[in-house]
Amino acid sequence: MTVKDQRARAVEQLVETVHRLLAPGGCPWDREQTFASMKRYLAEESSEVCDAIDALGDEATRPQGPATTLGREDRPVLEFREELGDLLMQVVFHSALASDRGWFDLDDVSAGIASKLVRRHPHVFGDVSVANSSEVLANWEDIKKKEKQGRGLLAGLPRSLPALRWAQRAGEKCSHVGFDWPDIEGPRAKVDEELAELDEARASNDRAAIEHELGDVLFSLCNLARKLELDPEDALRKANARFASRFEVVERRASEDGRSFRDHSLAELDGYWNEAKREGR
């Protein structure tokens, strides 16, 4: 059996397994599910894949070769494979639900995305020339705009995206059509401008205005992150992890003298926090 045949058989086995679960006499829980009820699991599995990617660390240091031959220290690779499988199952499950309704099946989904990739990569499958990845992205947006005629540039951004991620993607899309600052100084100055407006809103004690300006500050920080070629969602997630780790140290230090956490002064707690920062370096 060729590698191609093995791959096809593995996918076929997954499709057959999911359809068996959904068939009469299959799994009662699976048969009760709908697109809406499965939405939360789709989001969770996507997040778990992202966590698995983070756990890989520096990909350049990972050895090459089949995951089944890797040592215990490369458990993150096997967990990454497992999480991708869970996400793939979600795609197959939703396709199976659609197939039961006569809408489409996994073959249609696969053929559709394959065709889209060919259309949007004319520099690979056609005669278009590009100099770098920036031109690839610009062409992608131009092609997508023609495919989605009548829709605005940002219409395709899912409303369910995390707010930071939406702001980042919106900035990227606008940048690809030329609506952007020429360098990092523009968004950096914008941060100061928005912070000043936030201070003005605070002085007015207008809650709606404060919320409005706080949102503008966060959005401007996302643009700054984009110009720094950093992902604001990842940056905040790492900051959250640092905070949690340091706060655990503060809690531990505060418990060592037998007093409750609330019995410590802010100065004491701040001292423990600084200790945690030094330990983390």
Image: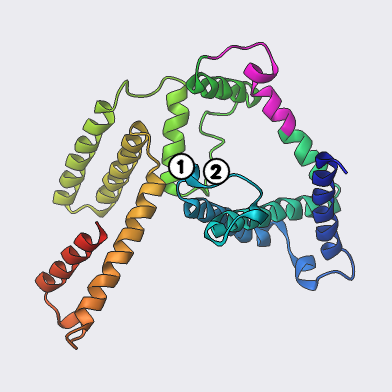
Circle 2 sits on which residue? 158
Residue 103 visible in the displayed image: no
Q: From this viewpoint, which residue is outermost toward the bottom?
A: 258
Q: Nearer the viewer, residue 227 or 125?
A: 125
In the image, residue 124 sits, relative to residue 193, either above or below, namely above
**Which quadrant, please, contains the N terminus?**
top right
Does 167 lie within the magenta span? no
Q: Nearer the viewer, residue 187 or 209?
A: 187
Look at the image and give the residue range highlighted in magenta: 114-130
Residue 70 left/right relative to 203: right
In the image, residue 173 sits, relative to residue 211, either above or below, namely above
Q: Are marks 2 and 1 in contact (CB under 8 Å)?
A: yes
Q: Amino acid at mark 1?
A: Trp
Q: Give the image quarter of residue 142.
A: top right
Q: Residue at x 86, y 56 (%)?
A: 16
In percent of width and height, residue 27 lies at 81, 70
Q: Residues within 10 Å of mark 1 (few under 14, many from 20)?
A: some
Residue 56 left/right relative to 200: right
Circle 1 sits on which residue? 166
Q: Residue at x 55, y 47 (%)?
A: 63
Of the numbered discs in the image, which one, if any, rests on residue 213? none
In percent of width and height, residue 244 lies at 32, 65
Q: Amino acid at mark 2?
A: Pro
Q: Residue at x 34, y 38 (%)?
A: 225
Q: Regarding mark 1 in the picture, which secondary structure is present there?
A: helix
Q: Regarding mark 2 in the picture, which secondary structure is present there?
A: loop
In the image, residue 133 sits, relative to residue 219, either above or below, namely above
